[in-house]
Amino acid sequence: MVNEGLTRLCRCLVLLIHTAQFPVQREIQKLERDLNAFNERIAELEDAGHRSHATEVLKANAIDFARRIDELRCVLVESAKAASKAKL
């Protein structure tokens, strides 16, 4: 049990160190957390039968977060391509 907790803690520390070195990835993770929160709230409202303007605003914000995540992922892909070309 303790071993499992230590393993989980080590993974978390490695993730924190890794994302500290890569600000784009850190921003993607932050946006993904925010997007998940929006999606959870939208699901709650829809499950409760709400079809209000607030729900539409949340959906628009969620789409914006998804777009921003995609843009940052494209930055990572382009950076990786440029780095691999530079090695050749």
Image: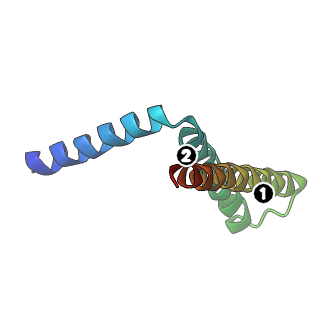
Residue at image position (37%, 34%) is 17
Instruction: Give the crowd class for mark 2: few <14, some 14-19, many >=20 residues within 10 Å.
Output: some
Could you tell me residue 8's position as x and y percent?
24, 47
Disc ID at residue 42: none
The answer to whether the residue labelled 2 contacts the one labelled 1, judged by CB atoms less than 8 Å apart, is no
In the drawing, does residue 6 fall left or right of residue 39? left
Which corner quadrant of the image does residue 10 belong to?
top left
Viewer-proximal residue, 51 or 33?
Answer: 33
The percent position of residue 51, horizontal first and vertical second, equals: 84, 64
- Quadrant of the image occupied by residue 48: bottom right
> Judging from the image, what secondary structure is the residue with disc 1 in?
helix
Color theme of the render: rainbow
**11 horizontally vs 85: left or right:** left
Does label 2 or label 1 sit earlier along the sequence? 2
At a point 66% along the width and 58% down the height, the residue shown is 39
The amino acid type found where label 1 is placed reads Ile
The disc labelled 2 sits on which kind of residue?
Gln
Residue at x-position 67% and y-position 63%: 43
How far across and down, in percent of the image, does residue 32 sit?
Answer: 60, 50
Q: Residues within 10 Å of mark 1 (few under 14, many from 20)?
A: some
According to the picture, the residue beneath numbered tag 1 turns out to be 63
Look at the picture and state if 14 lies above or below 85.
Answer: above
Callout 2: SS = helix
Q: Is residue 6 left or right of residue 49?
A: left
Q: Nearer the viewer, mark 2 or mark 1?
A: 2
Which label is found at residue 29? 2
